[in-house]
Amino acid sequence: MISKEAGFSQSSVLSDRLGSIDALRGFVMILMLVDHMRETFYLHAQVSDPVDALTTSPELFYTRLTSAICAPVFIWLTGLSAWLYSQKHSKTETSKFLLKRGIFLVFLELTLIVFLWAGKYPPDMFFLQVIWCIGLCMILLAGLIFLPPLALILLAVSIVAGHNLLSGFRVEEGASFYVLWAVLYQREVLEVGSIVFRTSYPVLPWVGVIALGYSAGPWFSNGSSPVERQRKLATYGVVGLFLFFIVRYLNFYGDSPWIAGEEAATTLMSFLSLTKYPSSFLFNLSMISLGLLLLVLFEKFQDRKVSQVMSDFGAAPMFFYAFHLAVLKIIYTIAYSIYGPSDGTYLSFPSVGYIWLASAVMVLALYIPTRWFAKYKQAHKHVEWLRYF
């Protein structure tokens, strides 16, 4: 028996719901590729965090800004996906899966991902980046899901909105909990014997983000109305952006203060320059709000070709992440061996426009293998290890 809500069959609701999630995930992954192209072929013009509006060119600033949405939306979707998984499994089974996958991602960051970034193993420094961060968030979420739903929501909102109150608190090297605090909130270089680590992605704010994603799960239940879900997503998205602009304009909390420059363009760049490491309240508020609105669009236009292409990328996220890093490293190594350095010790594109052009070409090249793996994964759901990719 097929139930219907707002003109949608239950199977249609399920397909649209999951398709839009994959489409949004694929969209932010492509923007991530653009940023990684920048980090590979435009590293001579490094950007600070938050990006300095007084010294960074507008084209580089906005190229960097486009990738700001990637981590918040991806980690929010990770929490949402965990809730969807829990609808077919017990809470204990869900917790075990989160724990195992989290440990796997931490291991992957410390081995394959570090190698793909550095081009050698062991590297001079282990940069603990987004895969490490997602892994730790999943490990912590494995315990947090046992909280009552309201308590989890309150905790998530408190972390995301309130953690900037801790921004002035520092733990000095040698003090108790120094390493723990470096992992949670304070970017540091840690030396463990002869091994050097860099806590690039302080985890604490992201724990709030993944918990928010998990808490939003009931909007996506099998019995939910697509119209009602889209209304909620749009409402929270618009209200979130409105709150962002108000708090940012008042310039009193949530991120580094913006400044009024001599030109309107500089002022706007300063206004939009937000802190990612650790991710500020205003950074996550603005990016998650944008993500909610994009999710509405991907669900409304599910049948459009662009949505289907985004879904193919989003259905195999870990495969795409590792594969595109490998391709970037191979291309750069070959190009460097042929042309040598062009800017100091780096081989660089002559302008920012080449970042976008090269990224478009690479997206086209990676589409077929990523779609193949996504279909292979879908056809072999019984294979346990494929779940992790």
Image (cartoon, rainbow, N blue to C red):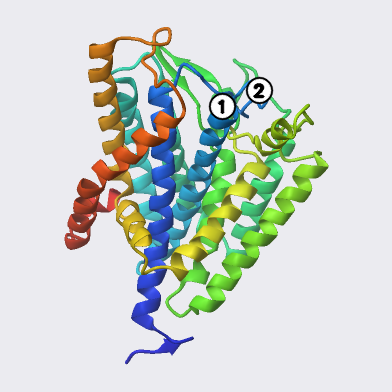
Residue 202 visible at all = yes
Residue 2 picture quarter = bottom left
What amino acid type should be assigned to the residue bearing mark 2? Val
| x, y percent for residue 160 | 64, 47
- Give the number of the disc on residue 182: 1
For the residues labelled 1 and 2, say whether their Cβ atoms are less than 8 Å apart: yes
> In this image, 307 relative to 297: left or right?
left
The crowding category of the residue bearing disc 2, from other C-alpha atoms within 10 Å (few below 14, some 14 to 19, many at least 20), is some
The crowding category of the residue bearing disc 1, from other C-alpha atoms within 10 Å (few below 14, some 14 to 19, many at least 20), is many
What amino acid type should be assigned to the residue bearing mark 1? Ala
Q: Earlier in the sequence, mark 1 or mark 2?
A: 2
Q: Nearer the viewer, residue 318 or 299?
A: 299
* Element carrying mark 2: loop
Residue 328 picture quarter = top left
Q: Residue furthest top?
A: 344
Who's the residue at 38% across and 11% down the image? 342
- Give the number of the disc on residue 254: none
Q: Nearer the viewer, residue 80 or 286?
A: 286
Q: Residue furthest bottom?
A: 1
Q: CA distance from mark 1 to mark 2?
A: 8 Å
* Element carrying mark 1: helix
| x, y percent for residue 115 | 29, 24
> In this image, 177 relative to 364: left or right?
right
Residue underneath mark 2: 171
In this view, 4 is above or below 345: below
In this view, 298 is above or below 49: below
Residue 132 visible at all = no
| x, y percent for residue 183 | 53, 30
Who's the residue at 67% across and 44% down the image? 282
